[in-house]
Amino acid sequence: MKKVWLFVLFLISQNSVFGQSFHNAKHYENAYDSISNWINNYKPKAFKNAVFLIENAAYQNDIPIQAFESDIQQLVSIIKAVKEKDHLIYSKQDSTSIQTYAAIFKTMTDTTLIYSEDKVLVNEPFTYDFNDVFGQENWANMFVTKLLATKKGNCHSLPYLYKILAEELGETAHLALAPNHIYIKHYSKKTGWYNTELTSASFPIDAWLTASGYIHLDTIRNGVYMDTLSQKESLDLTLIDLAKGYERKFGVLDGKFILKSVNKALEVDPNFINALLLKAETQKKLFENEMLLKSIDNPNDLIEQSEEYRNLFLEMQNIYVKIHQLGYRQMPEEMYLDWLASLQEEREKYQNKAIPVE
């Protein structure tokens, strides 16, 4: 698969992939149709398929699905070998699941040796890529395909890959949100709910998540942050990825595709913060673009001239109010990076020492 991933790396390096050309928008529409259908009628491994469709749409249908599937299955094989070799001492009824989670974690975060006949295969761990952590320079830096090609990822691609691998192995992995962040939550009959953090290869307690100061108590009460996402809500997350990828490629344009995507996500969870933020920001851009087009400097002038944009402005305003009432506070990128670093620097302080997979 090396030649295939060299081709993918070439695509990743070409920012022109995310230019303003409007051809092949059909790949986004097709991805939207599939994900919407899976939200309404969930099927196994829909999350993996959604991730692939989104990333493939960005590359104009150029990612070989065989390479994607082959790398996933290769990792699954390694995980099975690790699970067999490093048998965890754990006697509760959920032992099979916990053993699998431990093997996934070890495969993703540690160098593993796989013995095959007279050969020893070395599987290198995935590591955190501190370059362009939000995909602002290149949206492909958020992709699982980029992670598979480079072994470097972020708080988007790493938990996504973990969830995909867990589901390939017949287990459930719950995604959970924090400001600018995604992580994994598991349940163990021995310890209850616990956090799995792929960015730092650790199991932090909830205190680390709240240590940033950007998780308001209201966001926890309202299920915005630190709560498990259902399968439908995880697919919601991919719809927002799809909409953001569309915007990076084509711009906001008339906003219809982006708003269609976020509105579908909000049908599942009206408080889905990522969808609310993207919807409000899209409406803001549409309003500003119309002001620019009509050479209007004062927003009130456009509101007075157009009922359509008056309604758009009022809805946008209401969404921003709702976002604030839910407890959301914007977390600056530099603060986010400091927050991630704190887990490394104060590992003992935030590590969950009761974790059975430690």
Image: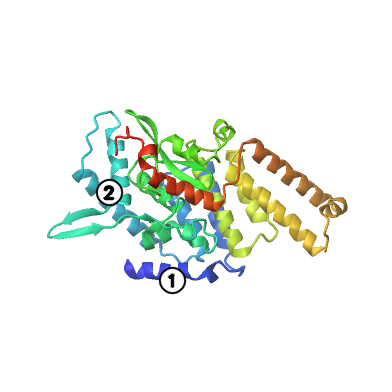
Circle 1/circle 2 CB separation < 8 Å: no
Question: In this orientation, does residue 308 appear?
Answer: yes
Q: Circle 2 is placed at which residue position?
A: 79
Give left or right: position of 191 versus 266. Answer: left
- Judge whether 40 appears above or below 193 on screen: below
Q: Position of residue 214 (x, y in %)?
A: 55, 41
Give left or right: position of 69 versus 234. Answer: left
Q: Which residue is found at the position 55% from the left and 66% from the top?
A: 18
Give left or right: position of 214 versus 197. Answer: right
Q: Circle 1 is placed at which residue position?
A: 10
Q: Which residue is found at the position 33% from the left and 51% from the top?
A: 108
Q: Which residue is found at the position 57% from the left and 39% from the top?
A: 268
Question: In this orientation, does residue 41 appear?
Answer: no
- Judge whether 314 appears above or below 55 on screen: above
Residue closer to the observer: 55 or 133: 133
Query: Quarter-wise, where is residue 222 in the image?
Result: top right
Label 1 or label 2, whichever comes before in sequence order: 1
- Quarter of the image with the N terminus is bottom left
Badge 1 amino acid:
Phe
